[in-house]
Image (spheres, grey):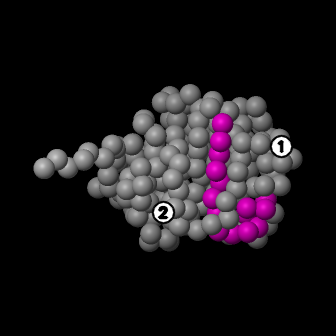
Amino acid sequence: MRIISGSLKGIILHPPKGLPVRPTTDRAKESLFNILENHFILTGLEVIDLFSGTGNISFEFASRGAAKVTAVDLHGKCIAWIKETALKLGLKQIHTVKCDALGYLRKCQTPADIIFSDAPYAMKEIIQIPGIVHHNQLLKLDGWLIIEHEVNLDLSHENGFFDKRIYGQSAFSFFRYVPSVPILN
């Protein structure tokens, strides 16, 4: 796993064997960050990385100047690896949360500029993520939710959906902040 760009460009990280992860490939990650950099100035953003696993995405955001990256994962060894690596790399903006990602979203009260989710592809609850993010207003104005998932999953009917990009057997579905409109009587 390598950091593609930013202040830590080129650093190769070697997560411990046995972590229950499927890291985003370098090709898909590079394509994702090209899309993001065409829409956002990453410096100063607040990011939530759900199902963070090895921290691959968290480290990339931090390297590119994100102000705060919250890495959420249920697996203790993943969280320990991310904490240890962030400390070694001097990435003070990475904060870890050992928690079920959906539970975290349900309790979260702080909106982010970008929420990235890379849940296990077999996890049926992936389809709940856009609704939870929308219901709890977890995206800032102009914020994006990005869900990495298996290519055959169709999330286009979910609130805020605007694009899907396919990379091999993986896909990214993109969602925008959609303001809630009060119902007037």
Q: Is residue 130 above or below residue 178?
A: below
Residue depicted at 50% across the width and 35% down the height: 35
Q: Residues within 10 Å of mark 1 (few under 14, many from 20)?
A: few
Residue depicted at 55% across the width and 62% down the height: 104
Relative to 32, 135 lies left or right: left
Q: Magenta stretch: give its range.
A: 67-81
Q: Secondary structure at mark 1?
A: helix
Q: Nearer the viewer, residue 78 or 30?
A: 78
Q: Secondary structure at mark 2?
A: helix
Q: Quadrant of residue 20?
A: bottom right
**Residue 148 placement (x, y as % from top left):** 50, 55
Q: Does the magenta portion include 10?
A: no
Give the number of the disc on residue 110.
Answer: none
Q: Quadrant of residue 84?
A: bottom right
Q: Is residue 122 above or below residue 29?
A: below
Q: Is residue 94 above or below residue 4?
A: below
Q: Nearer the viewer, residue 24 or 114?
A: 114
Which amino acid is tagged 2? Answer: Arg
Q: Which residue is mark 2?
A: 106
Q: Is residue 166 visible?
A: no
Q: Quadrant of residue 65?
A: top right
Q: Which residue is mark 1?
A: 89
